[in-house]
Image (tube, rainbow, N blue to C red):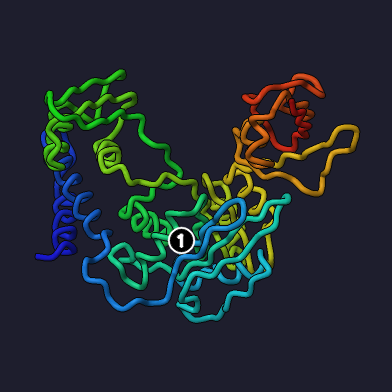
Amino acid sequence: MGILEKIAEIEKEIARTQKNKATEYHLGLLKAKLAKYRAQLLEPSKSAGAKGEGFDVMKSGDARVALIGFPSVGKSTFLSLMTSTASEAASYEFTTLTCIPGVIEYNGANIQLLDLPGIIEGAAQGKGRGRQVIAVARTADVVIMMLDATKGDVQRELLEKELESVGIRLNRRKPNIYFKPKKGGGLSYNSTVPLTQCSEKLVQLILHEYKIFNAEVLFREDSTPDEFIDVIVGNRVYMPCLYVYNKVDQISIEEVDRLAHRPNSVVISCGMKLNLDYLLETLWEYLALICIYTKKRGERPDFNDAIIMRRGASVEHVCHRIHRTLASQFKYALVWGTSTKYSPQRVGLTHIMEHEDVIQIVKK
């Protein structure tokens, strides 16, 4: 029996089993087995086949955004509209067969946008180059899921299921569980909050499935068995996802209103170029990027050339970005902007910068 058959069998078993107190251990064990088989499925095969054409693109710019969606939802049209790259767009499926990069220039930042081939159902098992597409998506900072507004919620559910099965968790934080395998001493199990979904016996069963008998486990939040399995496996990617509904010019205004009010969703029309500016604003928020301007002593700030950093960057990060030796020669910095109590404020290396701050660095 192959891995795919085993996975299908376990999925059927989970669907068949009633969820109640008596079956939670059985379900926990099945979920652990399922995660194990899926991990095996994603490992590259030992026998190396003929070397094909490379798929992934070199990372460039300040951030990376992946476009994921079913064939013919308007990914290539979107790339051509947003960037100066022309991706072939036609009215038949699978027009794009490889990964096509483009660059969005916004707020002085270069955001790399990847147009990936359409995903079909069963992509996680390798159908239609699905594995390569999903592997590239794992390296992105934000995923834009392009959906056809005329198709309802079917596409969204299928895509979420495909990405979930390869370890991409959308719009979720990492579970607050401390887990450390040890050499001996058995299982040390603790929790700082009352647990309603996991118990010591279930945790032990799941760890035994992974052949872990000595470990330290501390739950700092009420987590599900699935989240605990994610922590054990450890290769999960937690990333923000923006659901973009295209072709809204073909549906009723009530439906547009319903889709637009859903969490993490934006409605656009590539054909009529509607709402694209709002999508860019939302994307900027999701990428958590900030612009920082520099200023020389006695001169006006240089507003043409911004330093692009991640939200939460300190003065030390800015110094490293300008030159790697600057932090060691740093005396103090003067900062103007929203991160200060008054302008200019004299700050040290640990001061956290905010969007559109101006900094002047004074060396020793």
Q: Is residue 323 left or right of residue 52?
A: right
Q: Residue at x 23, y 49 (%)?
A: 35
**Residue 127 visible from this viewpoint:** yes
Q: Residue at x 61, y 51 (%)?
A: 62
Q: Residue at x 59, y 61 (%)?
A: 252
Give the SS element for disc 1.
Answer: loop
User: Measured from the top left, where is residue 231 in percent x and y?
Assistant: 29, 38
**Image position of 58 with respect to 96: above or below:** above
Q: Residue at x 54, y 59 (%)?
A: 245
Q: Is residue 184 left or right of residue 135?
A: left
User: Measured from the top left, where is residue 66 in percent x and y?
Assistant: 51, 59
| Residue toward you, 328 or 81 | 328
Q: Which residue is mark 1?
A: 152
For residue 296, what is the image quadrant? top right
Q: Quadrant of the C terminus?
A: top right
Q: Quadrant of the N terminus?
A: bottom left
User: Measured from the top left, where is residue 170 in percent x and y?
Assistant: 43, 47
Label 1 Cα crowd, 10 Å radius (few <14 / some 14-19 / many 20+): few
Q: Is residue 282 left or right of residue 265?
A: right
For residue 86, what is the image quadrant? bottom right
| Residue toward you, 222 or 151 | 222
User: Measured from the top left, where is residue 93 in percent x and y?
Assistant: 46, 78
Give, as a three-letter code, the residue at label 1. Answer: Gly
